[in-house]
Amino acid sequence: MDKLVIRGGKRISGTIAASGSKNSALPVIAATLLAPDGNFTINRIPDLQDVRTFSNLLEYLGAEISFADNVLQVSTANLKSVEAPYELVKKMRASIYVLGPLLSRIGHTRVSLPGGCAFGPRPVDLHIMAMEKLGARIVIEKGYIDAQVIGSKLRGARIDFPISSVGATGNALMAAVTAEGTTILGNAAIEPEIECLCHFLQKMGANISGVGTTTLVIEGVDRLHAVAFDNIFDRIEAGTLLCAAAITKGEITVTGLNPHHLDAVLKAFAEAGCTVTTGFDSITLAAPDKLKPTDVTAKPYPCFPTDMQAQWMALMTQAEGVSNITDKIYHERFNHIPELNRLGARIDIRENQAVVHGPQVLTGTKVMSTDLRASACLVLAGLVAGETTEVLRVYHLDRGYEKIERKLTALGADIERVKYQELS
Ligand code: UD1
């Protein structure tokens, strides 16, 4: 296995380009299943374990894929399976994104239920509800979702999501674009990654209106075609790099992104005393001498993202006072707290709220990654901790951050990747 060894105390400063977004790349790749002929070229695909896992799933289904220099080429002309097996789905929950496209194109699919995850239960009932509304018969058996179109084609329907779900909105969109008639998605997720998926589907020939709003109206079309497309940049990676500068009293410019995708996070940085300036496609952040405490609550976009909550907590361990951090999306997403406390942080949990008592002097030791963003949080803590921090099990980090140690090294960090064996 790999670990990251960080000798803290170095200031993060400089200019760095954001990588392509993982959370838009996955549904976009899934949507290629909707075009029965032609070759897709998708640019700015981050070279990440999750992208490789998803590509393996598509190859299992029969797609031909090549991936080099962040360009993914896909043809899904010759599909040979409609099953997303447990062995692949268990590696990545986002595999459920093949449900909508396969149902739409083939009329039948079997997708393994993803199971739990490191930060609590993550049901897929809304994905299933959406497929049923569009005219699929769903049977759950032996850990699989077996979905079959009733009749010859999916039929447009009104689907009101009781809570905002990125994944269920994406799946419903991909199922609806070639359904017969009109589909209306109410309380649809408006995350930039869903907007990106809509733009991709529109370029393929889909008829979607209301993009960027909570009501999406889809007029089904007969056929979609392969296209070339530029993926968007990763707002969570960008936010994490901004945190790296803020926690080390540094100054950073992250380029190549839409700053508005980070509005809520930039507002929190400003409240923490950072000086933030935005350009057309860049964000510059200069850290203050003393960070101020902040209260943030993670909620669906455009609010503060749950995927930045752990990194924000690492930052707030250095603020002068008490910060409150609440996660309204994943109430139990607090696995990073015991590890941060092992580094010397003082964080309590009170009724689903983390109370961070800052500032605390952190001192490096061995800490364990438990999920993707928790790993990022520990790397950030390591950047400011005294002595050496070893972040073990970085395979979690590799799922979502492209070349993170190279990027941080270029910005001044003392960080290296080392192979190790865990004691059994
Ligand atoms: C996506 C992101 C993930 C992010 C999350 C919330 C990808 C690949 N992953 O995950 O990084 O943390 O959005 O912004 O894009 N829910 C249900 N039933 C369902 C589906 C969801 O109850 O069928 C609940 C979830 O448990 C959660 C909330 O809805 O509490 C939002 O989850 P959702 O937006 O669906 O997350 P994902 O799409 O899985």
Image: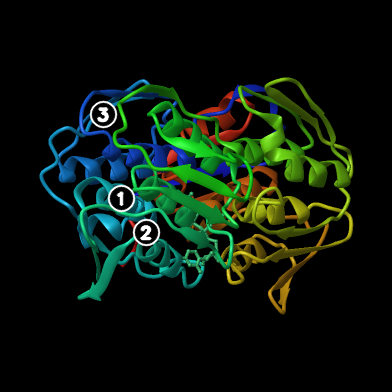
Q: Which mark is residue 74?
A: 3
Quadrant in which the C terminus appears: bottom left
From the viewer's perspective, tell me whether residue 109 is left or right of residue 421: left
- Judging depth in this view, the residue of 38 and 271 nearest the camera is 38
The residue at which mark 2 appears reads as 134
- Snapshot quadrant of residue 417: top left
Residue 141 higher or lower than 285, as above or below: below
| Residue occupied by mark 1 | 98
Image point (45%, 31%), residue name: 202
The disc labelled 2 sits on which kind of residue? Leu
| Front one among 339 and 118 | 118
- The circle drawn on residue 9 is none
Horizontal relation, residue 270 to residue 339: left or right: right
The first of marks 1 and 2 along the sequence is: 1
Whether residue 246 can be seen here: yes
Q: CA distance from mark 1 to mark 2?
A: 16 Å
- Residue 278 vs residue 196: left or right? right
N-terminal label among 2 and 3: 3
Real-space CA distance between mark 2 and mark 3, rounded to the nearest whole angstrom: 27 Å
- Which residue is at the front of the view, 296 or 242? 296
How many marks do you count on the picture? Answer: 3
The residue lying furthest to the left in this view is: 80
Crowd around label 3: few <14 · some 14–19 · many ≥20 (10 Å) = many
**Which residue type does callout 1 highlight?**
Val
Which is more toward the observer, 139 or 71? Answer: 139
Q: Position of residue 221 (x, y in %)?
A: 35, 37
The image shows residue 283 at horizontal and vertical percentages of 73, 27
Circles 3 and 1: CB atoms closer than 8 Å = no
Secondary structure at badge 3 equals strand
Q: Residue at x 69, y 53 (%)?
A: 314
